[in-house]
């Protein structure tokens, strides 16, 4: 996320500390499976690259980086705007190869740091256009040539609005209040490139895919069955446009 929580209509400090971490670790039900699958999809792809360093921008409580060991990614940074979530992430997941810090702190302490991968995991839907532009600029400045810029965000050309309604009913957190910039499989490239004309010059699209089609619903009954079904088709070759979660990968020229 960007600089100051006061920029947001939704008060992100109201989310209980470690809330999403506990949900992800539960390994039971729809919400837990949602996080499990999106993390796995990104990791599956990163493992096919030659990356050795990464930044997770908008890391919140650090759960995603906490699933990645240093056998592949030897330098890891998690960045966010919320000090209490950063403190939780450092307490729970920090190591000698993995650090968590405020975004402005990173920019100050590592002004010239470059990386091989930047992930933005379900962040951009929470932001205004100007804040997304900051992220696109950050990716342009910080990625090495050939580096990967990976984003995930809900697909509003899917059953996601229905799933969001269900989650709002069973969750302590209301997602409808948080999601202010919405994307669809057919327009995400165009919308992102329209936000920053230089981004178009510096990045090419490697793939756009979706996931979380029926498996989140199945996970409500059987987490193991949903996980097994999610592995039937390699997601990078999956071109079904109506999965509930979009995943798009850009390569730095």
Image (spheres, helix red, strand yellow):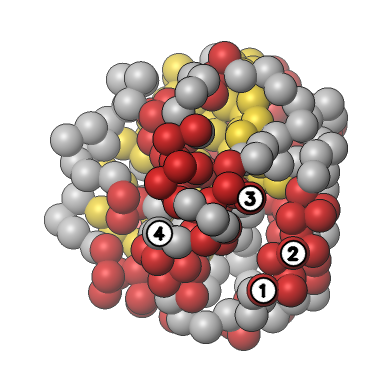
Determine the secondary structure under disc 3: helix
Position of residue 10 measured from the top left corner of the image (x, y, whole percent): 74, 76
Instruction: Give the label, 3 or 2, closer to the camera.
Output: 3
First in sequence: mark 3 or mark 4? Answer: 4
The residue shown at (54%, 56%) is 221
**Is 45 in front, or is 249?**
45
First in sequence: mark 1 or mark 3? Answer: 1
Left-right relation of 169 to 101: right
**Is 158 in front, or is 105?**
158
Position of residue 190 measured from the top left corner of the image (x, y, whole percent): 83, 27
Q: Which mark is residue 166?
A: 2
Determine the secondary structure under disc 4: loop
Q: Splitting the image into 4 quarters, where does residue 242 fall?
A: top right
Left-right relation of 178 to 35: right
Determine the secondary structure under disc 2: helix
The N terminus - image quarter = bottom right
- Whether residue 134 appears in this view of the structure is no
3D distance between C-alphas at marks 2 and 4: 18 Å
Q: Splitting the image into 4 quarters, where does residue 225 fall?
A: top left
Q: Are marks 3 and 4 in contact (CB under 8 Å)?
A: no
The residue shown at (29%, 45%) is 68
The residue shown at (45%, 28%) is 231
The crowding category of the residue bearing disc 1, from other C-alpha atoms within 10 Å (few below 14, some 14 to 19, many at least 20), is: few
First in sequence: mark 3 or mark 2? Answer: 2
- Whether residue 36 appears in this view of the structure is yes
Q: Are marks 1 and 4 in contact (CB under 8 Å)?
A: no
Position of residue 182 measured from the top left corner of the image (x, y, whole percent): 82, 48
Instruction: Give the label, 3 or 4, closer to the camera.
Output: 3
């Amino acid at each position: 996320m960007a600089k100051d929580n006061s920029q947001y209509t939704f008060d992100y400090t109201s989310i209980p500390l470690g809330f999403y971490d506990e949900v992800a670790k539960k390994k039971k039900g729809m919400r837990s499976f949602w996080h499990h699958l999106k993390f796995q999809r990104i990791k599956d792809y990163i493992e096919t690259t030659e990356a050795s360093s990464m930044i997770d921008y908008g890391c919140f409580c650090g759960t995603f980086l906490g699933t990645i060991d240093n056998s592949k990614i030897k330098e890891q940074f998690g960045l966010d705007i919320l000090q209490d979530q950063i403190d939780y992430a450092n307490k729970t997941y920090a190591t000698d190869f993995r650090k968590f810090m405020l975004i402005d702190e990173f920019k100050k302490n590592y002004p010239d740091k470059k990386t091989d991968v930047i992930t933005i995991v379900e962040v951009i839907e929470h932001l205004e256009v100007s804040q997304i532009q900051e992220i696109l600029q950050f990716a342009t400045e910080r990625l090495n040539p050939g580096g990967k810029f990976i984003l995930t965000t809900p697909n509003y050309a899917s059953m996601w609005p229905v799933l969001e309604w269900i989650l709002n009913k069973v969750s302590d957190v209301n997602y409808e209040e948080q999601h202010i910039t919405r994307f669809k499989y057919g327009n995400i490239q165009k919308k992102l490139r329209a936000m920053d004309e230089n981004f178009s010059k510096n990045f090419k699209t490697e793939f756009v895919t979706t996931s979380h089609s029926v498996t989140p619903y199945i996970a409500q009954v059987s987490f193991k069955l949903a996980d097994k079904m999610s592995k039937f088709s390699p997601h990078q070759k999956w071109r079904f446009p109506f999965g509930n979660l979009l995943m798009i990968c850009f390569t730095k020229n």
